[in-house]
Amino acid sequence: MQRAALLDAARSLLSEGGTEALTFPALAERTGLARSSVYEYFRSRAAVVEELCEVDFPVWAAEVETAMAAADGAEAKIEAYVRKQLELVGDRRHRAVVAISASELDAGAREKIRAAHGGLIAMIVEALGGLGHDQPRLAAMLLQGVVDAAVRRIELGAAEHPETITEAAVAMTLRGVRP
């Protein structure tokens, strides 16, 4: 239970203040544990981040997969893939994953994040193949780049409303740069 409380506190800290806010003293304060107790559960900030990725990313990916499964046809699946990821931007789990990806991580943690993103991209490859792409994996990686850019734009609190950013990202993924 204390480990779960520490992870929840880490999500909150990352969501509120980014990676700089994730410190062991802050985790201890949020959970009511002694600072030394935090070290009994995690050896470093990178270990906290790594565990958050292991716990949260699969839940997030499952939500994207569920949205895609409910869509009918390749184009609708692609739209669901984009919309669901951008809908999740406000979710604390997502904010933590975004903050995590900007932090200084060890090679093992970075590899786990890359593998998790690879699983997300793999979800869309079949739909892109169904649209007739010669290289659906490459198309999936580029499509995810559009999603990632839209996520960053929303996270930054851009001048555009998040719905406007979402509509632009969906249009770009489905129709390219044509207006």
Image (cartoon, grey):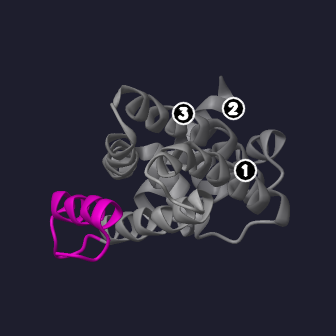
- Number of other residues with Cα within 10 Å of mark 2, as a class: few under 14, some 14 to 19, many 20 or more: some
- Number of other residues with Cα within 10 Å of mark 1, as a class: few under 14, some 14 to 19, many 20 or more: many
Magenta residues span: 157-179
Instruction: Where is residue 109? Give x, y as percent.
Output: 77, 57
Disc 2 residue type (three-letter): Arg
User: Real-space Cα distance between discs 1 and 3?
Assistant: 15 Å
What numbered label is drawn on residue 170? none
Instruction: Where is residue 137? Give x, y as percent.
Output: 61, 58
User: Real-space Cα distance between discs 2 and 1?
Assistant: 13 Å
Report which residue position mark 3 lands on.
59
* Residue displayed at 31% across by 59% down: 174
Q: Say if residue 164 shows up in the picture.
A: yes
Q: Say if residue 32 shows up in the picture.
A: no
Q: Using residue 66 as the reference point, say whether residue 84 is left or right of it.
A: left
Q: Using residue 76 as the reference point, say whether residue 165 is left or right of it.
A: left
What numbered label is drawn on residue 50? 1
Mark earlier in primary sequence (1, 3): 1
Q: Secondary structure at mark 1?
A: helix
